[in-house]
Image (cartoon, helix red, strand yellow):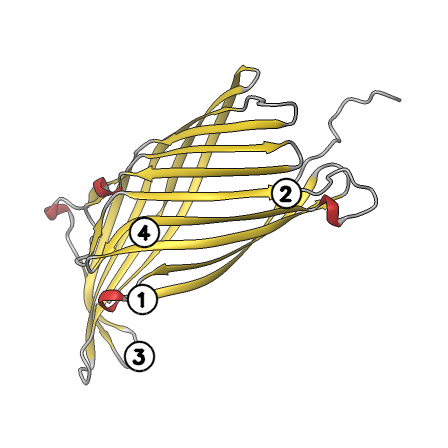
Amino acid sequence: RGLGDVYKRQLYVSAGFQLASNLHIGATVNFNFGTLNNNRVQSVEDVQLGTLDRRESRVSGFDFNYGATYTPNISDKLTLYTAVSVNTQANLVSENTQTIGSFSRTTGRDIEVFEVDLDSQGKKNTEIKIPTTATVGLGVGEDKKWFLGAEYSMQELSTFENQFITYENLEYQDASTISVGGYWVPDYSSFSSYLNRITYRAGLRFDQTGMVVNSEEINNFGITFGFGLPLGRDFSNLNLGFEVGRRGTTANELVEESYFKVSLGLSFNSLWFQKRKIN
């Protein structure tokens, strides 16, 4: 069986510009770095020792994200929201190490482990290519009242390439995600009711992950809902979100996973730095 871990870090710099009253563009430069760990073990019942194959990749590299939004007013109250973004292909450099050996099935301790000479195989330094992702979004809403929108993204995951860590039963095909959702605020300026100032959110999504395991597509369906809880009168919010979903399939001896996720975030907007109008 195989087990894997991903330890990812990212540094980024973003800039945005207003080209017209309702047209904005922006770009982000991301520097990605971290570690990929993959452990493969094999054991047989009633045999004391098992075999192991440990692989570690220290990864780093850049990718770029470009985006644009256009938000014209279509009536006195309604605004049309359109957006497009492209996250370019990430060409990551991977510095690899590999050890193989045996371990005790009783204690789990290594018995005899050797480091593989990857230089002689040309696998000491390899590349990982993460394909470009393109996203488009469309929505309509009333400012500080309600919003309804949809988003579609696609990725040519069939071109994904990792020369060092591979899986015999895993293939890749193009991936896509469709999301629909919105929010509603009964009365953001209400003084008499806190419940009326809460932002109520809901949505759903369907992911074709692009992973094909044992010739079966691995898809995901999720339903999300949450609340934006106002903190004071300066438009700060405590955002609480939930997701209920199902991922995978039971076909071809695979596993279908039902999950429940909780997220917590803080949106902080302060008026401290506004210039005083009255001293």
Callout 1: SS = loop
Q: Residue at x 74, y 46 (%)?
A: 196
Q: Residue at x 37, y 44 (%)?
A: 177
Residue 232 percent location from the top left of the image: 77, 42
Direction bottom: furthest residue: 46
* Kind of residue indicated by mark 3: Thr
Q: CA distance from mark 1 to mark 4?
A: 23 Å
Q: CA distance from mark 3 to mark 2?
A: 56 Å
Q: Is residue 267 left or right of residue 1?
A: right
Q: Residue at x 27, y 52 (%)?
A: 211
Q: Is residue 31 above or below residue 164?
A: above
Q: Nearer the viewer, mark 3 or mark 2?
A: 2
Q: Does residue 91 appear anywhere in the picture?
A: no
Q: Which residue is identified by label 1?
A: 255
Q: Residues within 10 Å of mark 4 (few under 14, many from 20)?
A: some
> Which sits in the foreground, 16 or 156?
156
Residue 35 percent location from the top left of the image: 34, 49
Residues at circles 1 and 2 in contact by the CB criterion of under 8 Å: no
Callout 3: SS = loop
Residues at circles 4 and 2 in contact by the CB criterion of under 8 Å: no
Q: Residues within 10 Å of mark 3 (few under 14, many from 20)?
A: few
Image quarter where the C terminus lies is top right
Q: CA distance from mark 4 to mark 2?
A: 41 Å
Residue 15 percent location from the top left of the image: 50, 24
Residues at circles 1 and 3 in contact by the CB criterion of under 8 Å: no
Q: Which residue is identified by label 4?
A: 36
